[in-house]
Amino acid sequence: MRVLWLMTGFLAVGTGTLGIFLPLLPTVPLMILAAFCFGKSSPRLHNWLVMHPVYGEHIRDWHTKGAIHRNAKKLATVSIAVAFGLSVLLGVRAQILMIQALVLCAVLIFIWTRPTV
């Protein structure tokens, strides 16, 4: 089981790293997932990620307070609006747009109801 957690952690870090370059791919949530997976498989990698100069603070805030930084909330909101706007511009069917709108609204509600750091 340890190997599965380790592989999932590496997959989350790899995908999160892609999120640095792809604006609609969330980096920090994937790093939080990676920290969780590494916590189950490798104390050394978990510590490296939790103490990371860029992602460590976000991971610690989520772990200790369930909190999301205000700027991250704003960026997530803009990204969600852009993704939905792109779907509208591409002429996605109305039924799909309705499903997408419901899911994205649920995501925004989740994000904005978390404590703010």
Image (cartoon, grey):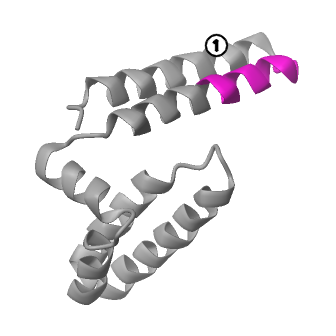
**Visible residue check, residue 1:** no
Q: Is residue 3 magenta?
A: no
Question: Residue 99, position in %: x, y?
Answer: 61, 19
Residue 49 versus residue 34: which sits nearer the camera?
49
Give residue 96's quadrant in the image.
top right
Q: Is residue 86 above or below residue 46?
A: above
Which residue ends up furthest to the left in the rendered image? 64
Question: Measured along the vertical axis of the image, is residue 31 above or below residue 114?
Answer: below
Q: Residue furthest right?
A: 90
Q: Is residue 85 magenta?
A: yes
Q: Is residue 92 above or below residue 79?
A: above
Q: Which residue is mark 1?
A: 98
Q: To which quarter of the image does residue 20 belong?
A: bottom right
Residue at coordinates 21% horizontally, 85% vertically from top-left? 43
Kindly report the secondary structure that dominates the magenta region of the rendered protein: helix
Relative image position of residue 34 (x, y in whole percent): 37, 68
In this orientation, which residue lies closer to the viewer: 68 or 5? 68
Image position of 28 (left or right of 67): right
Q: Which residues are magenta?
A: 81-92
How packed is label 1: few (under 14 Cα within 10 Å), some, or many (20 or more)?
few
Tell me which residue sits at (23%, 79%) in the image. 47
Check the picture and name the quadrant holding the C terminus: top left
Quadrant of the image for the N terminus?
Answer: bottom left
Question: Which residue is drawn at the image coordinates 60% and 57% (left, top)?
Answer: 19
Give, as a three-letter code, the residue at label 1.
Answer: Met
Secondary structure category for the residue under label 1: helix
Tell whether 24 sits left or right of 39.
Answer: right
Where does the image place residue 68, in percent across and percent down from the top left?
A: 29, 40
Q: Which residue shows up at 53% across the image and 24% down it? A: 104
Q: Is residue 72 visible?
A: yes
